[in-house]
Amino acid sequence: MNRLLGAVLAIPLLYHAGAAQVIEFESNGLKYQALTKSGVTIMYAHLAPRIHKYSIVQLAITNGSAGPYTVRPEDCTYMREGGGDVEASPAKEVIQLLMKSGSGSDATKLITAYEAWVAGIPNYRATNGFESRRQSALGMGASKVRSAAAASAIALTQTKLAPGQSTDGAVFFATDGKPLAGGKLVVRTNTDRFEFKAE
């Protein structure tokens, strides 16, 4: 009986010790949050520029689990404290908008913001991220095409990660050009809910 009681009392302690904890850190002028669940780690930071009606969050996902893991930008929601949650826009929608009304400065802002984000994370190397997508975006002509190509290169798209793979990408939230503030990022996947700290 005492052995059974000891085992029952230990369950909450084990659960608490194994509970996912958000890790916060600052680097290169950006504030990051990271969270690991079921062997999968998601890290994010806000990117400074806003492009047209979009605020941008940069995500990095590493699959440390034993099986494949699929991520999509549409699984991200910014939950505001007083309501008015904002769901992430599909990458295709953002790229189409920039094809119609993008500028050369949009392309520059996107690439510069992404490079600052990567510079802030020592030893980070995605196996399936921006660097592999950037090659197809180089050398584009007109400014609208360049800004759409830049968005295409940095945007997080639906990706299936094998065990040990990682990816990164920008997630765009339609906020009418207002910054994302006074809330928290939530990423829902088929297996977990990653809920970051309120800002």
Image (cartoon, rainbow, N blue to C red):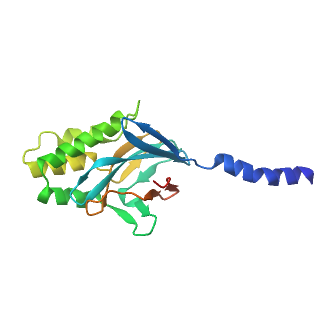
Q: How many marks?
A: 0
As drawn, the residue found furthest toward the bottom would be 83
In the displayed structure image, the side of residue 80 where residue 110 appears, left or right: left
Q: Residue at x 27, y 46 (%)?
A: 154
Q: Position of residue 158 (x, y in %)?
A: 35, 54
In the displayed structure image, the side of residue 195 where residue 70 appears, left or right: left
Q: Nearer the viewer, residue 92 or 20?
A: 20
Is residue 133 something that shows in the picture? Answer: no
Q: Position of residue 124 (x, y in %)?
A: 40, 34
As drawn, the residue found furthest toward the left would be 142
Q: Residue at x 25, y 53 (%)?
A: 50
Is residue 74 something that shows in the picture? Answer: yes
Q: Position of residue 180 (x, y in %)?
A: 36, 57
Above or below — where is 159 with respect to 139? below
Above or below — where is 18 with respect to 177? above
As drawn, the residue found furthest toward the top would be 123
Looking at the rendered image, the quarter that the N terminus falls into is bottom right
Q: Position of residue 178 (x, y in %)?
A: 29, 60
Q: Residue at x 48, y 55 (%)?
A: 198
Q: Nearer the viewer, residue 13 or 51?
A: 51
Q: Nearer the viewer, residue 40 or 160?
A: 40
Q: Residue at x 87, y 54 (%)?
A: 5
